[in-house]
Image (cartoon, rainbow, N blue to C red):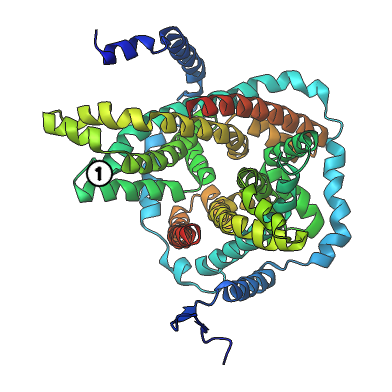
Amino acid sequence: MNLLSPKKIQLPNGKTVVEKKSATPLVIIILLLCTIVSVNITGFELGAIIKRINQFFVILDDMIPPNMEYMPSLWQPLLDTIKMSLIGSVLGAIVALPIAFFAASNITKNRFVSSGTKFILSLLRTLPTLIVALIATFIFGIGTMAGTTAIFLFTVSYVGKLLYEQIENANMDAYEAMQSMGLTTVYSFRYAILPQVLPNYLSSTLFCFEGNVRYASILGYVGAGGIGLLLNESLGWRNYANVGMILLMLAVTVFVIETVSEHYRKKLM
Amino acid sequence: MNAIEQQLQYEKRNRVSFIVTVVVIFIMLVWSASAINLENMAANGLDIAKNIILGILSPDWSLILDFKGGVPYLLVETMAIAFLGTIIGAIIAIPLAFLSASNVVPKPVAYIVRLFLILVRTIPAIVYGLMFIRVTGPGPAAGVLTMAFVSIGMLAKLYVDIIEELDRSVLESMTSIGCNMFEKIRFGIIPQLSALFLSIVIYRFDMNLRDASVLGLVGAGGIGAPLIFAMNSYRWSQVGSILIGLILLILIVEFVSNKIRAKIVKG
């Protein structure tokens, strides 16, 4: 089996060097196997899809042109969606700060506290947002409150994770100097670590807000308020011209928010 | 006045812009605070919450241990959907990313492709799901296509960042020693891109696994539909068992994928 044994190269000075075999062929074989298994499980047939792909454009065709008369009744739910993601993101980001403080192992010296907080954060992150929203509608009733809760929890977990990673990678010199001068942990964190991580913290909050606006439209689908409720209704009635209008307004809103927040994120960096 | 104080004097005074920013953000917060209202809250909301939590904490073990049609099968199906969807999305996103990189194609073309990508990204997964169900009929195959299209937007955007930071000096030196186009792509461009692209795709697989529950809403397969059915009929112990399976799977996949990504990027 010459294929598997490493290739030896004789150098001019008499030493032999062993060339490591690339793992690429193995990886490709594993990926191919996984793909075949997945195709079998999901019943994915390329031929049938190509034959029926024109069906895909039926709905798309109905969406164009969008129903412009539907626009006036969309403003309120759209603003609700933005409100939901704004307050959820801001509150979430504020709560994420103390949590990240406790999760960062270089600030919180107690191993149990820091790894416990980290575990809670990753548990929170694995809960699908949609499911959280659905549970929240059972508790808070149908409306924006349920969506706000779901967005809040998602933001806490997302910003919290990014923030504690930032804190753990921060430069500790100033922090240690302040500690040795007798400042408390909280004070030295405030004056030595926070200024270092602040731009990144604000930037990831903005990024999270961007994503939340887009996600909030799905949350409405399970009754968590905002424009998703109308989307659900229009899809239910198969009124695709209205769906087109909703999607158009969403796209414009997302584009505007993304452009603004990208501008500020570039400034922050 | 010493040197430090002098330097401080030169520092830009941005107190006005700071105050304006704070006031604007505060006004926006007050405006959006109306999203928090407890009017619709059921009178026994806290009782319901208690029941939900108790139900989730006492999962239905028979569902977890049922290997035919139970939680394990649903998890494998969800993984298959996410895997295939990610791969298809990753392949479709590559040409789109090159077409929207401003150092590869002229600026106007890049701009138009970018606008198209924003449109692709804005359409929610549910709408894609409904469109693809017309193509393939309800089932996991529709889920695969949905996952693929949902992934394209983010994958292309992250690819573009890498393509735009491509190190051109390698290509120039290869031109100067007489490499042809194919050799330049094979030995100059692919090694620079492949590791980072792969890392992005693995990250997206992670996300897709997490978002796969959305597909259940429209009947596009995966673990979402049984989960939502169980929730709507208040069978919280079943919800608990499905959630435990899902969370365990996501945690394991996340751990493994973090390890692989660290290995790929650091070499």
Left of A207 or right of it: where is B19? Answer: left
- Say which residue appears at 51% left-offset and 30% top-offset: A206
* Residue at image point 41% right, 66% down: B61
Residue A156 coordinates in the image, percent (x, y): 41, 37
The percent position of residue A249, horizontal first and vertical second, equals 72, 27
Q: Is residue B82 visible?
A: yes
Q: Helix, strand, or loop for circle 1?
A: loop
| Number of on-image labels | 1
Task: Evaluate whether residue B219 shows in this view.
Answer: no
Q: Residue at x 65, y 58 (%)?
A: B188
Residue furthest to the bottom in view is A1
- For residue B82, side relative to residue A92 (left or right): right
The answer to whether A144 is drawn above or below residue B214 in the figure is above
Closer to the camera, B48 or B118? B118
Picture quadrant of residue B178? bottom right
B101 or A103, nearer to the observer = B101
Q: Is residue A13 above or below residue A160?
A: below
Residue located beneath label 1 in the image = A106
Q: Outermost residue toward the front?
A: A13
Residue B74 picture quarter = bottom right
Up-down relation of residue B136 to residue A17 (above or below): above
Q: Which chain is home to disc 1?
A: A
Amino acid carrying label 1: it is: Asn
**On the picture, is B74 further left or further right than B245?**
right
In the foreground, A13 or B115: A13
**Percent position (x, y) of residue B160?**
65, 44
x, y (%) of residue A198? Answer: 38, 29
Residue visible at 76% across and 45% down in the picture: B99
Task: Name above or below for residue B140 compared with residue A64.
Answer: below
How would you rate the neighbour count of disc 1 (Cα within 10 Å): few for under 14, some for 14-19, many for 20 or more? Answer: some
* Quarter occupied by the N terminus of chain B: top left
